[in-house]
Image (cartoon, rainbow, N blue to C red):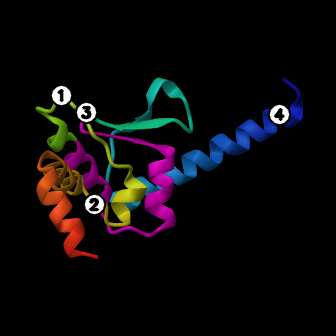
Amino acid sequence: MNKTTETLIADYENACNKILKAFTKKQGLDDYGWIAEEIGGTVSFGDDYFFDIKEIIVDLKTDQPKGLILKWQEENIEFNRFRGDKLYISYESYTKGKRLSDYEETKASLDNPLELIKAIDNNF
């Protein structure tokens, strides 16, 4: 690896660690580490929460309220606990208002096609 590449990688890793530090301070989390020591990948906060760098950046960049990302992960886990067909909503979509309960409403409509057709007809 040449010196320029080494410098770029070191700068990237430093930036990721600074982002992680800002996130942990904002969320009040500790006991964290990069999984498999892969800086810029996924971070483990004890055995409770796991976030990848993209989710952390979304949280900071969009100035989400403290704890929203924790609630998002808990809701994803709880929703899928006993489901065969696992569903997942990205954190970015969650911050924009998308919820797993939206899926249930859509699925209920699809389970009853006549009601779905009536609802569509009433809206046009």
- Where is the C terminus found, in terms of image quarters? bottom left
Q: Position of residue 106 (x, y in %)?
A: 21, 54
Horizontally, is 3 left or right of 100 in the view? right
- Seen at 21% across and 40% down, the residue is 77
Residue behind mark 4: 5
For disc 2, the marked residue is: 67
Which sits earlier in the primary sequence, circle 2 or circle 1? 2
Provide the secondary structure element on which disc 1 rests: loop
- Badge 4 element: helix
Q: Nearer the viewer, mark 2 or mark 1?
A: 1
Magenta stretch bounds = 48-76
Q: Do the residues under discs 3 and 2 have CB atoms within 8 angstroms?
A: no
Sequence-earlier tag: 3 or 2: 3
Residue placed under numbered mark 1 in the picture? 84
Marks 2,1: beta carbons within 8 A: no
Q: Nearer the viewer, residue 122 or 11?
A: 122
Choose the circle earlier in sequence order: 2 or 4. 4
How far apart in space, not on screen, are marks 2 and 4 (Cα)?
37 Å
Q: Position of residue 92 (x, y in %)?
A: 42, 57
List the residue tagged with mark 3.
Answer: 47
